[in-house]
Amino acid sequence: MLMVLEGLIVPAAFVLVFGSVIGFDRWREPRRPLHRPFAVADTRTFSYAQRRIERLVERGGPEDLQCAWMGATAICVWLRGEVRSGRPGRRIRRASQLERWEAQAADLKGRFTAV
């Protein structure tokens, strides 16, 4: 019985440490500064990036629009990868989202370069 407990200590500690790091990161995410660069790697970060870009566009300053454009570019890069290598059922939806985000990225770039 003692050997079983000793064998479970290391995996339990591993789960505890990494679980707390992941939990802290998700708790901290909405409180991060808006101007901090970010990456889009999955659907969770995609939805977070959409909300963040909406907030930046609402603020409307030149540096806000530039950060929103960088975020839209990150979304486009992720969507291109999903269209190329994603599940066949999702490819059509991701392709339509990609068209929309490419148009929005072009609009944002035009807005912050005109200011």
Image: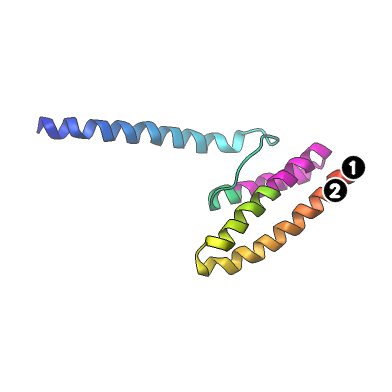
Q: Residue at x 52, y 69 (%)?
A: 89
Residue 92 rendering spot, x and y as whole percentages: 59, 69
Residue 44 rendering spot, x and y as whole percentages: 54, 49
Q: Which residues are magenta?
A: 48-72
Q: Look at the image and say whether residue 44 sits in the magenta stretch.
A: no
Quadrant containing the N terminus is top left
The residue positioned farthest toward the left in the image shown:
1
Q: Which residue is mark 1?
A: 115
Q: Residue at x 76, y 55 (%)?
A: 104
Distance of mark 1 from mark 2, alpha carbons? 7 Å
Q: Look at the image and say whether residue 55 sits in the magenta stretch.
A: yes
Quadrant containing the C terminus is top right
Indicate whether 33 appears above or below 73: above
Q: Three-letter amino acid code at disc 1?
A: Val
Left or right, 5 with respect to 73, comes to left
Q: How many marks?
A: 2
Q: Which residue is mark 2?
A: 111
Left or right, 49 with respect to 43, comes to right
Residue 27 rendering spot, x and y as whole percentages: 52, 36
